[in-house]
């Protein structure tokens, strides 16, 4: 849908700053001059740049990258999932997980989150001991709810997995840079945990969704396993050049993060003033309830040029299951009357809040 204010898929709505764009164009031009050759299949300069960005003493051999973190996740399932293997996550969560799992015939176990979509070490531990999965993904902060978890939850998951099944733990930190405290990351837990994988993306905080660059930090043995399943030369020379350019200007590229965080907090404050029920979020979006008819509000916002997300559509596996359970086709299946909005620029956020006020006043 082409609308003036698109806040539906958690993109960073800011453009790449001009000074960075110029450098990236120069790098792309240079790589064009040797585009008749296959690219560096181990993409070492990019892995070096990603290791430097993450810090924590990581080396290029700790880093993997692919065309979006969706492809990184697919590599993980190709290497560690498959028929007879089991994958567990805590729902509602990112709708791509079950889709990627099914593509590798990995069994999917969905365990419900607690009240207000929160997780506790106890809940995580109990689920892992009950199901003994080979792969667990913790999305932190969680999409579509925004819910952050503490490092204690990640440590509990890792310890339980070690004891229960020897499985791997993936922490999906797609929105990590938007967190209240950016020093809180599962990357700090990597030393001594060789089955912990931390997934990141340049799609959100780096405002680089169209470039398709996701990456991962883990033990070098994990990276070697991923190298076995990727297709040769999976990262194009253009992708590598563009990502290296963006990372060379990481500070400028991330300069919009503070503003987006401020707009997110503004959305939470304003929604409460409207009598709505926003959930706690450490991401660049806010899930909110308190709506009796989210589908109608969604439609009325769209008529005002504002596109947000009806989260019922965000979790097709769950929707599919619910349809199957009932044997009927239901239209407005939502997460208990919720919608999800991404924090855009100040002007976009204002447009959303104004449109919502109008809709609620009707
Ligand atoms: C957006 C998102 C991703 C990133 O996808 P890319 O393929 O890197 O664009 C990964 N995980 C979650 C939870 C997301 O919301």
Image (cartoon, rainbow, N blue to C red):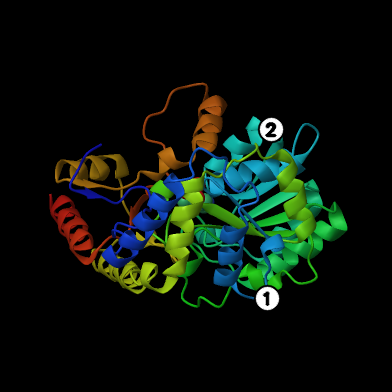
Secondary structure beneath label 2:
loop
> Label 2, on which residue?
104
Residue receiving disc 1: 57
**Residue 191 in view here:** yes
Q: Quarter of the image containing the N terminus?
A: top left
**Up-down: is 31 above or below 351?**
above
Q: What is the quadrant of residue 190 in the picture?
A: bottom right
SS class of the residue under badge 1?
Answer: loop
**Number of marks in the rendered image:** 2
> How crowded is the residue under tag 1: few (<14 C-alpha within 10 Å), some, or many (20+)?
few
- In the visual, does 203 lie left or right of 166? left
* Residue depicted at 47% across the width and 57% down the height: 243
Q: Residue at x 53, y 45 (%)?
A: 67
Percent across and percent down for residue 174 are 51, 58
Residue 211's x, y, as percent? 42, 48
Viewer-nearest of discs 1 and 2: 1
Specify whether 245 is left or right of 78: left
Lateral position of residue 261 relative to residue 89, left or right:
left
């Amino acid at each position: 849908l082409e609308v003036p204010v698109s806040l539906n898929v958690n993109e960073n709505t800011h453009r790449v700053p001009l000074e960075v764009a110029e450098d990236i164009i120069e790098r792309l031009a240079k790589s064009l001059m040797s585009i008749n050759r296959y690219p560096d299949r181990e993409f070492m300069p990019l892995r070096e740049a990603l290791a430097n960005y993450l810090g924590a003493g990581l080396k290029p051999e700790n880093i993997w990258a692919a065309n979006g973190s969706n492809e990184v996740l697919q590599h993980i399932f190709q290497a560690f999932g498959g028929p007879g293997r089991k994958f567990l996550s805590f729902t509602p969560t990112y709708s791509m997980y079950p889709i990627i799992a099914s593509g590798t015939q990995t069994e999917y176990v969905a365990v419900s989150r607690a009240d207000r979509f929160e997780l506790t070490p106890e809940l995580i531990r109990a689920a892992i001991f009950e199901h003994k999965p080979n792969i667990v993904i913790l999305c932190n902060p969680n999409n579509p709810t925004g819910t952050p978890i503490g490092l204690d939850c990640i440590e509990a998951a890792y310890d339980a997995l070690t004891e229960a099944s020897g499985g791997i733990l993936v922490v999906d930190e797609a929105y990590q840079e938007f967190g209240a405290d950016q020093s809180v990351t599962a990357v700090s837990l990597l030393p001594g945990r060789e089955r912990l994988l931390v997934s990141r993306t340049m799609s959100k905080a780096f405002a680089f969704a169209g470039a398709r660059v996701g990456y991962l930090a883990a033990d070098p043995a994990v990276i070697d396993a991923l190298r076995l399943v990727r297709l040769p030369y999976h990262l194009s020379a253009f992708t590598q050049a563009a990502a290296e350019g963006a990372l060379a200007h990481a500070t400028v590229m991330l300069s919009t993060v503070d503003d987006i965080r401020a707009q997110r907090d503004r959305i939470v404050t304003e929604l409460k003033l409207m009598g709505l029920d926003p959930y706690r979020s450490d991401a660049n979006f806010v899930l909110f309830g308190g709506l009796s008819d989210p589908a109608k509000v969604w439609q009325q916002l769209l008529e005002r040029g504002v596109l947000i997300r009806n989260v019922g559509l965000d979790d097709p596996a769950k929707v599919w299951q619910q349809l199957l359970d009932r044997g009927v086709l239901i239209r407005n299946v939502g997460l208990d009357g919720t919608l999800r909005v991404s924090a855009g620029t100040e002007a976009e956020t204002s447009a959303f809040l104004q449109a919502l006020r109008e809709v609620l006043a009707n």
